[in-house]
Image (cartoon, grey):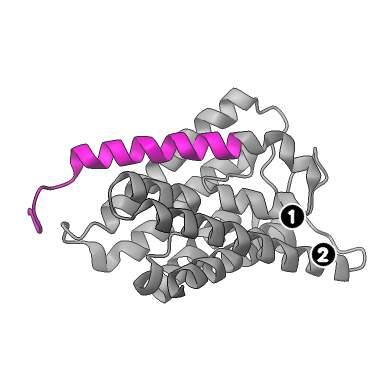
Amino acid sequence: MRKFLAEGIGTMFLVILACGSAVLAGPHIGVLGIGLCFGLVLLGLCYCIGGISGCHVNPAVSFAMFLSGRMKGGECVGYIVSQLIGATVGAGFLYCLTEMGLDYNYGGTTAASGSILATNVLQPGATPLMALLTEGLLTFFFVLVVLGATDSRTSFTKFGGIAIGLALGLVNIVGIPVDNCSVNPARSFGPAVFDPTAWGDFWIMLAGPAIGAVLAAVAWKALAPSSKNPL
């Protein structure tokens, strides 16, 4: 139960702080700043709840962990449910913040949809195929970093949180101009609950990360050392 609670709280704060950076400060900090916020939030969470649940806060990561044999199916389902609930609660808090403001200059979201919750929808000019490929490749990279940085057979697990945080920041900087960057179905689900216009592109935020997670699990199985501290 502690693991599920940690995943729920962690995902809640990921949405409040990372998506909140786009909603409340987007016009001032830009894509680079928003990407940095995503990375810093995850970095902090890694060292806060990493020792409790592993700090997945992302169904794609949990799915890859299951495929890699690091967690059982039931536990994986519990993680994903906790992440979805946490993301929804976080988006609810963020929605309340937006409702409290009067003529506030919200930004950092998608101009075409008019969303104020940084939902994952296609940016002007982006196509579904472009977004699907972007989500798949970026999730592949991000989850591969997670699998490698947390594998007990390597020598670098103490610095895993730093690598994971930097990886999330990087993929957001690349992916935000395409679809506000998901690589995390929970991060997409929470804000979409409060913005029905986001459901049209939601399938991309499921399929892309799922494909990327599978590729990452397969790739790490081929790359992973056969014994501890191979170097």
Read off the magenta span.
Answer: 204-231
Side of 122 relative to 49 (left or right): right
Residue at the location (59% across, 68% down)?
13
Sequence-earlier tag: 1 or 2:
2
Report the residue marked by disc 2.
98
Local crowd size for mark 2, using a 10 Å CA cut-off: few (<14), some (14–19), many (≥20): some
Residue at the location (31% across, 62% down)?
160
Local crowd size for mark 1, using a 10 Å CA cut-off: few (<14), some (14–19), many (≥20): many
Work out whether residue 156 or residue 34 is closer to the camera in this orientation and state it: 156
Q: Quadrant of residue 214?
A: top left
Name the secondary structure under disc 2.
helix
Report the residue marked by disc 1.
117
Residue farthest to the front?
74
Residue 12, position in %: x, y? Answer: 60, 66
Q: Quadrant of the C terminus?
A: bottom left
Is 18 colored magenta in this rendering?
no
Side of 142 relative to 115 (left or right): left
Main SS of the magenta part reads helix
Residue 76, position in %: x, y? Answer: 42, 54
Side of 21 relative to 146 (left or right): right
Q: Kindly check if marks 1 and 2 are in contact, taking CB atoms under 8 A apart as contact.
A: yes
Residue 225, position in %: x, y? Answer: 13, 48
Q: Is residue 152 above or below residue 69?
A: below
Residue at the location (57% across, 47% down)?
185
Check residue 185 in the rendering and tell me which mark sits there, or answer none: none
Residue at the location (34% across, 40% down)?
216
Residue farthest to the right?
102
Q: Amino acid at mark 2?
A: Thr
